[in-house]
């Protein structure tokens, strides 16, 4: 018999759990889209949206999922036949590359595999060799949701600068925005795309493209950009806050307003801290389980792991079996392995993922850990002891993983002297 009756938990890496405040905000009659409350609310909301991305650059909203934002960003900076470079660390990097190919762009992919971050030295090499500066943009996932690798945008910025290459640096923060620390302006990211249904806790359907003045210049030199994806009118408040290229996505906007209130009431630093501590609690449990059984964190180096999602291998078809058990018996839906196929596991059924982005707190994470241990016991998958105690200890300490000393002296100084408003 099942033990799943009660509030279920969708612990997949998006869509994420929707807060009651977001659901309440969306449970309302249709507003007037032309004047009054809604356009005013959107105008007032944009600075709060930019603050989550730590940017004073331009921000636009599209009525689309993340794939739409991928296409929107590319459509504004490169035309058919022009070249872009994709640094892939999992399925989502390849997905953005595929979108570029669909637009007729020439795409070069640097594939860093499924367990490692982007190597800035290799990127610098490719950029240095491009003496004609044909590469218009370097695209990457801040967090690749398939592998749970987290890349460091600062290292990529340095690679571009050291190569003296003018390409735009374009980040996919669909999984990481509002979860992992990200500072668009301070880190020198030119274009950033995000979606509503992950760290931002709103249903899928809105996506965002942020772009700076350098990217705006590239757009200005484009011969033609498709009307719907063109970011120029979308960044014009007078036009855009009433007219979203059509009818405004009324209820998603109401939900987003409520979500941004939650984020800024908690404080962005506190939001990042909460995700960092909870992720560390999950890893502590996983490492203990792995001591006495097949469970493995996909990313060995904790410094390179995302705080939004954790990809795990269990071998055989155990990932799939565990997911079925936790959903049917315990009311927890875990994420499936994505893009992790291997020769002995063509469907990637040995893998699963835990989503821990957005509206997630300590009791939810500790609950998921208890359920996973129950599932492994029920399925007779061996595991090491002490995992739940290890997770509880991290929660009790309330300490994130200590950062590696990878900041250069310059960066550390810049960060220390940054005005509080810019952080
Ligand atoms: C979810 C996700 C996407 C795709 O977003 P959709 O809304 O599903 O189109 C792209 N990139 C990353 C990093 C993601 O996590």
Image: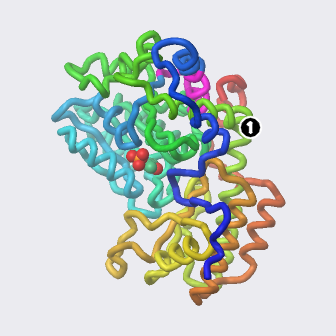
In the image, 297 versus 363, the foreground residue is: 363
Residue 251 x, y percent position in the rendering: 51, 32
Q: In the rendered image, which quarter contains the C terminus?
A: top right
The relative height of residue 177 versus residue 374 in the rendered view (above or below) is above
The x, y position of residue 281, in whole percent, is: 71, 63
Q: Which residues are magenta?
A: 45-58
Magenta highlight on residue 57: yes
The furthest residue to the bottom: 380
Indicate whether 245 appears above or below 151. Answer: above
Disc 1 residue: CB within 8 Å of ligand 1: no
Whether residue 287 appears in magenta in the rendering, the answer is no
In the image, residue 271 above or below residue 73: below
Report crowding for label 1: few under 14, some 14 to 19, many 20 or more residues within 10 A (C-alpha): few
Q: Residue at x 49, y 19 (%)?
A: 32
On the image, numbered disc 1 is attached to which residue?
A: 266
Task: State the image coordinates of residue 241 (x, y, percent, origin top left).
Answer: 47, 17
Q: Is residue 334 left or right of residue 84?
A: right
Q: Secondary structure at mark 1?
A: helix
Q: Is residue 408 visible?
A: no
Q: Please report the residue visible at 51 percent of the width from the left and 47 percent of the height from the top.
A: 175
* Residue at screen point 46% across, 43% down: 204
The image shows residue 300, relative to residue 95, as above or below, that is: below
The residue closer to the viewer here, 250 or 159, is 250
């Amino acid at each position: 018999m099942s033990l799943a009756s009660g509030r279920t938990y969708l612990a997949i890496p998006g869509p994420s759990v929707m807060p009651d405040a977001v659901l309440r905000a969306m449970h309302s009659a249709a507003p007037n889209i032309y004047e009054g409350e809604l356009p005013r609310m959107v105008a007032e909301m944009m600075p709060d949206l930019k603050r989550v991305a730590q940017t004073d650059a331009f921000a636009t909203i599209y009525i689309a999922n993340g794939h739409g934002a991928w296409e929107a960003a590319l459509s504004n900076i490169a035309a058919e036949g022009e070249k872009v470079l994709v640094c892939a660390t999992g399925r989502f990097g390849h997905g953005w590359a595929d979108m570029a190919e669909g637009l007729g762009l020439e795409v070069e992919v640097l594939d860093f595999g499924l367990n490692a971050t982007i190597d800035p030295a290799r990127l610098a090499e490719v950029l240095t060799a491009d003496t004609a500066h044909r590469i218009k943009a370097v695209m990457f996932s801040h967090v690749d949701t398939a592998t749970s690798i987290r890349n460091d945008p600062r290292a990529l910025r340095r690679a571009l600068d050291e190569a003296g290459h003018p390409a735009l640096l374009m980040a996919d923060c669909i999984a990481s925005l509002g979860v992992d620390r990200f500072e668009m302006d301070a880190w020198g990211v030119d274009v950033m795309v995000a979606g509503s249904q992950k760290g931002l806790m709103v249903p899928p359907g809105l996506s965002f493209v942020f772009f700076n003045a350098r990217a705006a210049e590239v757009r200005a030199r484009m011969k033609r950009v498709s009307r719907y994806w063109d970011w120029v009118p979308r960044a014009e408040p007078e036009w855009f806050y009433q007219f979203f290229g059509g009818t405004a996505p009324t209820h998603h906007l109401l939900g987003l307003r409520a979500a941004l209130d939650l984020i800024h009431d908690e404080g962005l630093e506190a939001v990042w801290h909460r995700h960092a501590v909870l992720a560390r609690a999950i890893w502590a449990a996983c490492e203990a389980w792995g001591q006495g059984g097949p469970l493995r964190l996909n990313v060995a180096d904790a410094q390179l792991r995302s705080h939004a999602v954790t990809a795990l291998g269990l071998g055989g078809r155990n990932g799939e079996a565990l997911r079925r058990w936790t959903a049917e018996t315990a009311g927890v839906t875990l994420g499936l392995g994505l893009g992790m196929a291997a020769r002995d596991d063509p469907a990637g059924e040995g893998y699963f993922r835990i989503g821990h982005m957005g509206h997630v707190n300590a009791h939810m994470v500790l609950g998921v850990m208890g359920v996973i241990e129950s599932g492994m016991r029920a399925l007779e998958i061996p595991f090491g002891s002490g995992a739940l105690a290890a997770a509880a200890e991290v929660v009790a300490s309330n300490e994130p993983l200590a950062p590696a000393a990878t900041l250069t002296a310059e960066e550390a100084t810049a960060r220390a002297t940054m005005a509080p408003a810019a952080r």
